[in-house]
Amino acid sequence: MVTEVAPLKKLWPAESYHRGYYRLHPENPYINNVSAAKVEHVQKAFASELKSPR
């Protein structure tokens, strides 16, 4: 299996209940156990590229 990397044709905005989910639901077990470490890593690795910390 191969994943094609191609330019986006159109970007669809997330539904309103998905927007800010990480920030609004810090008690969520998945966020605590999986996402938080990934977000922290990206914030450190790309600090100069990010508009603001999330």
Image (cartoon, rainbow, N blue to C red):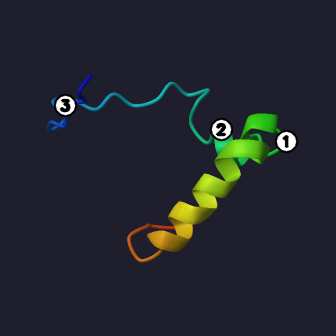
How many other residues sit within 10 Å of disc 2, few (<14), some (14-19) or many (≥20)? few
Q: Nearer the viewer, residue 16 or 18?
A: 18
User: Mark 2: which secondary structure?
Assistant: helix
Residue hosting label 1: 27
Mark with earlier residue (2, 3): 3
x and y, in percent, of residue 35 in the image: 65, 46
Amino acid under disc 3: Glu
Q: Which mark is residue 7?
A: none
x and y, in percent, of residue 22 in the image: 67, 44
Amino acid under disc 1: Glu
Given this view, does label 2 or label 3 mark the residue nearer the observer? 3
Q: Residue at x 56, y 36 (%)?
A: 19
Q: Cα distance, mark 1 to mark 3?
A: 35 Å
x and y, in percent, of residue 12 in the image: 33, 28
Amino acid under disc 2: Tyr
Residue lying at the far bottom in this picture: please name it: 48
In the displayed structure, 22 sits above or below 1; it is below
Residue hosting label 3: 4
In the displayed structure, 49 sits above or below 38; it is below
Left or right: residue 13 versus residue 1 is right
Q: Which mark is residue 21?
A: 2
Given this view, does label 2 or label 1 mark the residue nearer the observer? 1
Left or right: residue 4 versus residue 37 is left
